[in-house]
Image (tube, rainbow, N blue to C red):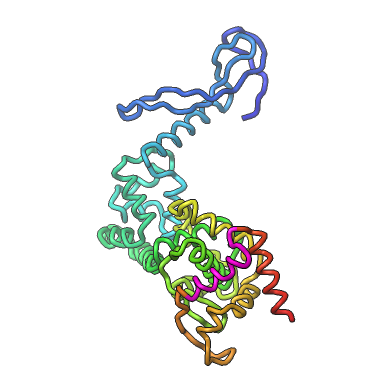
Amino acid sequence: MNKKKIICPECRTYTGYIIRKEKRKYIIRDQEYYFDITVAYCEKCGEEIEVPGLLDLQMKEVDEQYRKKENIVFIDEIEKLMTLYDIGKAPLSLGLGFGEITITRYLKGQVPSKEYSDIIKNALESPKYMLNKLIENKNKIAANAFEKAEKCALNLEKMFNISSKMLSTISYIFEESLEITPLALQKILYFIQGIYLALYDVPLFDEDCYAWVHGPVYNSVYNLFKEFKYNPIDDDRFMILKNRFEELTEQERNVIQLVLNSFGNYSGKVLEEITHQEDPWINSRNGYSFLEPSDNLIEKNQIQLYFKKIDKEYSLRNIKEINRHINEQLELKNK
């Protein structure tokens, strides 16, 4: 909000004003709340005054803080749900079991009840829940709207065949990376798992890794993103992963960030070439020619032993040391 001079209604002076944040009491649905609200005071007489745009800002602050405190869905989350399932306001409303214009009212700013908010949040978090809601209310929705939303739900449901930790890890990678290809994602996941195993003796996620021609691959992740081929992953469906990374511990995030700040600076092809020089992939591909397809398991203990060896030589807690290891691997490749 731009600070301009105004006429103070108290002292009738053309003067400036001071902006502050203060706790104010509000009664909403018979409950008492205290919110941090922006207020303005006259520089001349010190009385609280109204300035242009302030009331709208205060209403927005109350709305946001109330929704956050009561875990009520936000407008942008409802818009996200519509995008995820390629569905309009009226069919979404009916599909969730609401009245036809309920979602329209929510998009205009009406705050949902906790019951209805929880339904929307559940639909946003679980494609299976959304699919069940759509089927339950199928007779209320136009056929083509139902079919489009059902197709989206079925596609999204495939994503949840992956473990929660893997989804959270991918969510963090998406949050921190401007763009990433499926090939680069596979290798980043492999290095994250390797370093985490070396430092903490447990896997970050449960999925097994396999030795394919182009390096270590997590099959379920490959199936999820294979349609992008060598292009960056970009699809509204994956908005459902946004903020899942908040479930990760600080320890887990630190390891992911270490990998992104080091290995993450290279293309998928370069990362593939690095893995081709490492024992876990080489040993699991034993007996195969260079371009011969294979789907052999790379045992987690093989990955752990290899990265523990690297940790002893380079210290995998230190980003400079990780980069030194990468540079030496790249120099070895070019010899």
Quadrant of residue 157 in the image?
A: bottom left
Principal secondary structure, stretch drawn in magenta: helix
Q: Nearer the viewer, residue 282 or 49?
A: 282
Q: Which residues are magenta?
A: 302-317
Asked if one can make out residue 144 in the rendered structure from this viewpoint, the answer is no
- The image position of residue 189, as x and y in percent, is 52, 67
User: Is 245 a magenta residue?
Assistant: no
- The image position of residue 96, as x and y in percent, is 31, 53
Identity of the residue drawn at 32% across and 62% down? 128
Q: In this rendering, is residue 274 above or below 31?
A: below
- The image position of residue 115, as x and y in percent, is 29, 44
Q: Quadrant of the C terminus?
A: bottom right
Query: Extreme top residue here?
Result: 11
Side of 87 relative to 116 (left or right) = right
Identity of the residue drawn at 36% across and 25% down? 27
Query: Extreme right residue here?
Result: 335
Q: In this rendering, is residue 300 above or below 9?
A: below
Q: Quadrant of the N terminus?
A: top right
- The image position of residue 81, as x and y in percent, is 42, 54
Identity of the residue drawn at 52% across and 92% down? 287
Side of 165 relative to 273 (left or right) = left
Q: In this rendering, is residue 289 above or below 51?
A: below
Asked if one can make out residue 302 in the rendered structure from this viewpoint, the answer is yes
Q: In this rendering, is residue 115 above or below 46?
A: below
Side of 147 relative to 177 (left or right) = left
Identity of the residue drawn at 45% across and 77% down? 299
Q: Nearer the viewer, residue 213 or 94?
A: 213
Q: Nearer the viewer, residue 141 or 68?
A: 68
Query: Extreme front residue here?
Result: 312
